[in-house]
Image (cartoon, helix red, strand yellow):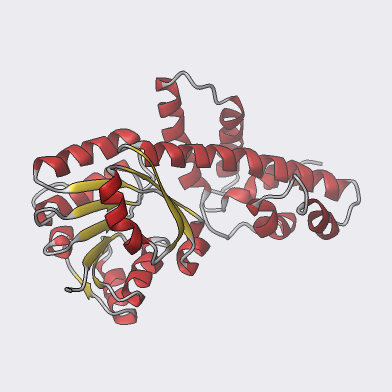
Amino acid sequence: MAKVKVAFIGLGVMGYPMAGHLSKAGFDVNVYNRTAAKAEQWAKEYQGTAYSTPKEAATGCDVVFVCVGNDQDVLQVCEGENGVLAGLKSAAILVDHTTASAELAKQLAASCEQQGNDFIDAPVSGGQAGAENGVLTIMCGGDEQVFKNVQPIMDAYARFSQLMGPVGDGQKAKMANQICIAGVVQGLSEALNFASRAGLDTDKLVETISKGAAGSWQMENRSATMVKGEFEFGFAVDWMRKDLAIAFEEAKKHQADLPMTTMVDGFYEQVQELGGNRWDTSSLIALLQKKG
C-alpha cells in the first residue's frame, strides 16, 4: 500500500508542530509557509519537502491541511493560480484547521465539490502546548465518510476529534469553545484577584478548589502564572478577539444572546489598550491587578 502523501500549509506556532507530528507518524509531508525560511527550517528539522507555493505543495497529495490566521489568509493560500485548489488532484481532501467563519467553510466546500474534491472544516483547541504535545481537540464539519478517512491522519496530533455535523459545524463548535473560555478565564481572574487581596494562599486555594466543581483546564494550567502577572503562554488576545468577532456575527444569525461574552470581549479590548495584544488570554487578570 502506497504511503499517504499530505501537505501542510501554514507553519505558525500551531502548524509547525502539527506538521512535525505527521512526519514523525510516517506520512510523506510537503509544507508551505508564506515566510519561506520557516518552511526550509521545518524541512531540515523533519523529514519532508518545502515548496515555494501552496499549489506546488498540494500537487499529488491525498490530503492537504491548512492552518493560517483568518478567513482572508485561508483564501489567499487556497485560491488563485498558485493556490491549494489549483494543485489538488482528483478526490483529494482539503482540511482547514484555521479558526474561521462557517460561511468560509461552505464556500471552500463548494469550490472543492466543483472540481471533484472533498472538504472538512476542522478548527482545533488546545493551544500551542496541545499542538506541540500532539493532544489537540478537533471539531469537524463535513461528510461522515470523508471525516473517517482523515481522522486516522489527524490522530498524529489530536487527542480527540469529533464530527459535529455538516460543513460549517466544526467552526460553530469552535465558536462555542471560545465563548466558554472567555467566561471561565474572567471568573478565574476575579477569583484569584479576590483571593490575593483577601490574604489567601493562592497555591493552596487552587490545589483545593481545583478538585471540586470550580476546577478547569485554565485553573490547572494558568492560575500560577496569572497570579505572577506572566502572560506569555499560548493564545494571544488579538487572536481571541478575532475569534469572538466571528462568534458574534454567527450569533446574530441565530438570535443567540452573548451578554457575558460581549462584556469579556470589552475587557480584552482594555487589555489591548494596556499593550497586551500578544499577551495570552489569561491576561484578563491584569485589569484587576492594576486597580488599587
Please tell me in which quadrant of the rendered image residue 156 appears.
Answer: bottom left
In the image, is residue 214 above or below residue 17?
above
Percent across and percent down for residue 190 are 75, 41
Q: Residue at position x 23%, y 46% from top?
A: 119
Q: Foreground residue, 131 or 231?
A: 131
Which quadrant of the view contains residue 2?
bottom left
Residue 242 shows in the view: no
Above or below, 230 against 276 in this view is: below
Image point 45% across, 39% down: which residue? 173
**Number of numbered tags placed on the structure image:** 0
Q: Quadrant of the N terminus?
A: bottom left
Q: Is residue 244 visible?
A: yes
Q: Position of residue 47 (x, y in %)?
A: 28, 80
- The image quadrant of residue 82 is bottom left
Front residue (pair 49, 27): 27
**Image position of 8 (left or right of 127):** left
Question: Most extreme residue toward the right, as rendered?
Answer: 199
Q: Is 245 situated left or right of 47 in this image?
A: right
Residue 59 drawn at (x, y percent): 12, 62
The C terminus lies in quadrant:
top right
Taking the image as shown, residue 38 lies to the left or right of residue 210, namely left
Which sits in the foreground, 49 or 115? Answer: 115
The structure residue drawn at horizontal position 45% and vertical position 33%, both measured from the top left corner, is 247
In the rendered image, residue 103, in percent from the top left (x then y), is placed at 30, 33
Identify which residue is drawn at 74% across, 45% down. 214
